[in-house]
Amino acid sequence: MVRVPARRRRAFQRRLLAWYRRSRRDLPWRRTRNPYHVLVSEIMLQQTQVARVVPKYREWLTRYPSIEALARAGAREVREAWYPLGYNARPLRLRDIARAALRRHRGRIPQTREELLALKGIGPYTAGAVLSFAFGRDEPVLDTNVRRVLRRVFLGEAARPADRALWDLAAALLPRGRAYDFNQALMDLGATVCTARRPGCRACPLARLCVSYPLAAGAAPQNPVTW
């Protein structure tokens, strides 16, 4: 288990949220709390760059503005509407979720983790994202960017912790009542600063807290936490 002292945890939260207020990206799905719209964005963003998703997200919601509209669509139609995002199982998965929501939840995206995970095509990350971004729940998220940030800051570049440990760490770091901004901030930092290649360590708001700073071949961790 990763143990983070309370003082370090508060510093992490404070620095990350302050950076996000200054630097957050203006993305269309951040202008809505509509659960269906949030779900569409999260499914589209799986393994796909933000720049490619933005125009398709807008086009998709014009064509399928509601769960009901998507549930009525045919398989060929939704595949064509999805093009050219790739991973073509995703639009059918999204349509199946819409149909299940109509059958089981009166056309609404459910508001509990258990009910979301019961919908085929929704995993732990997507459930956490919908709960925190659409419903304002204090739920952690763990995608590729968040994994990288947490690993580098608290464990070091060479560490390969189990996902369960990182989920627990993400939950422990979450400031109550601030899940939306905190989770978005973690993902933005990983996407724009703490990148997989050539991370911008000197511009990172967490540099003074990061055991991997400065990230360079052979650099030794500075302030490792208990593992």
Image (cartoon, grey):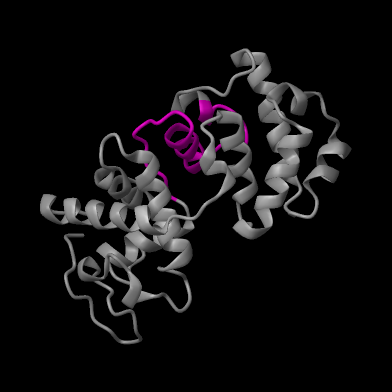
Quick check: is 117 in the magenta stretch?
A: yes
Q: Which residues are magenta?
A: 116-142
Direction bottom: furthest residue: 218
Q: Residue at x 87, y 37 (%)?
A: 77
Question: Horizontal placement of 51 versus 15: left or right?
Answer: right
Quadrant of residue 213 within the rendered picture:
bottom left
**Does the rendering let one see residue 51?**
yes
Classify 165 as above or below 71: below
Direction right: furthest residue: 76
Find residue 117 and report its horizontal and vertical position in percent. Answer: 52, 31
Q: Residue at x 48, y 43 (%)?
A: 125
Find residue 44 and report its horizontal and vertical position in percent. Answer: 65, 47
Q: Quadrant of the C terminus?
A: bottom left
Classify 208 as above or below 174: below
Direction top: furthest residue: 106
Find residue 1 and report its horizontal and vertical position in percent. Answer: 23, 52
